[in-house]
Image (cartoon, grey):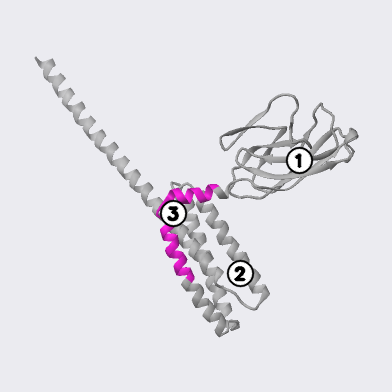
Amino acid sequence: MENEKKMKTLVIVLAAVAVVLAGILAWIWVDRNGMIGSLKVEKEELTGQMLQLKSDYDGLSSNNDTLNAQLSVEREKVVQLIERVQQTDVKNRTKIREYEKELGTLRGIMRGYIKQLDSLNTLNIQLREDATVARTEARDSRTKLTELQTTTDEYAKQVQIGSVLKGRGVMLTAINSSNKDTDRSSRVSKFRTCLSLVENSIAVKGPRRIFIRVKGPDGILLTSGQQQIFTLNGEQMIYSASREVDYQGSEIEICIFFGGSQSFVKGVYTVDVYTEESKLGSADMLLK
């Protein structure tokens, strides 16, 4: 009998402890979600303030080239700060606080430039009218920005578009067995495709594979004899050659070589360059 009473007492105590623990866990969950929501609002408000600061910088100008150059530098700092905020996780409270301090510093710098502009008296009546128009446009821009910020999906889409890797300066060259350029079809040993991957601070960093598709004068794709496939926007495509590069956001130059076992005939050859996200560019070359 005494053991049964002890057992009942133990069950009651354990049940009470379980209820208390469940309450604590529920409170922690609600508090965490509330904190994340608050940080998300803070991030959105901070982004809006930075965009406003950039708009204010856009409205400042003078007849002094040196001062205009300084304003351009500070405006670029604001743009870079906006990009860093957009890439920062909403839960990274420490970073958000750092960006708020940077924003305050940039605001102070802008106030200093405004004082310089006033002291130099470089704004005439027409420029003051332009400034009024600019402020009106800035208010309209803030209204539009508020409308855009009603959906984070649209915002994420814009960031995704800006992060796509881009290329420029695509060149297709034929080289002989001595690795010298040639335009004689009978002397060609292989093709060299060179291009630059442009700077993009918000693009994905790390290994990136670049693909080339070389076509002969008859429009037929040239390959090394084995079918090599990559996927572009869900569509599978055969490629002639590829190369992996370590992209860290800065502009880099790369070259990709293709040398099939077939002979090369006279005519115009073309090359298209891709990543798995988009087309980087095209070039052509005439062999005599």
Could you tell which of marks 1 and 3 lies nearer the N-terminus? 3
Q: Nearer the viewer, residue 75 or 266?
A: 266
Q: Report which residue position mark 3 lands on.
A: 43
Element type at mark 1:
strand
Q: Report which residue position mark 2 lands on.
A: 71
Amino acid type shown at disc 3: Lys
Q: CA distance from mark 1 to mark 3?
A: 47 Å
Tag 1 near tag 3, CB within 8 Å: no
Q: Nearer the viewer, residue 252 or 38?
A: 252
Amino acid type shown at disc 2: Leu
Could you tell which of marks 2 and 3 lies nearer the N-terminus? 3
Amino acid type shown at disc 1: Thr
Tag 2 near tag 1, CB within 8 Å: no
Could you tell which of marks 2 and 1 lies nearer the N-terminus? 2
Would you place residue 216 above or below residue 62 in this image? Answer: above
* Mark 1, other Cα within 10 Å: few <14 / some 14–19 / many ≥20: some
Tag 2 near tag 3, CB within 8 Å: no
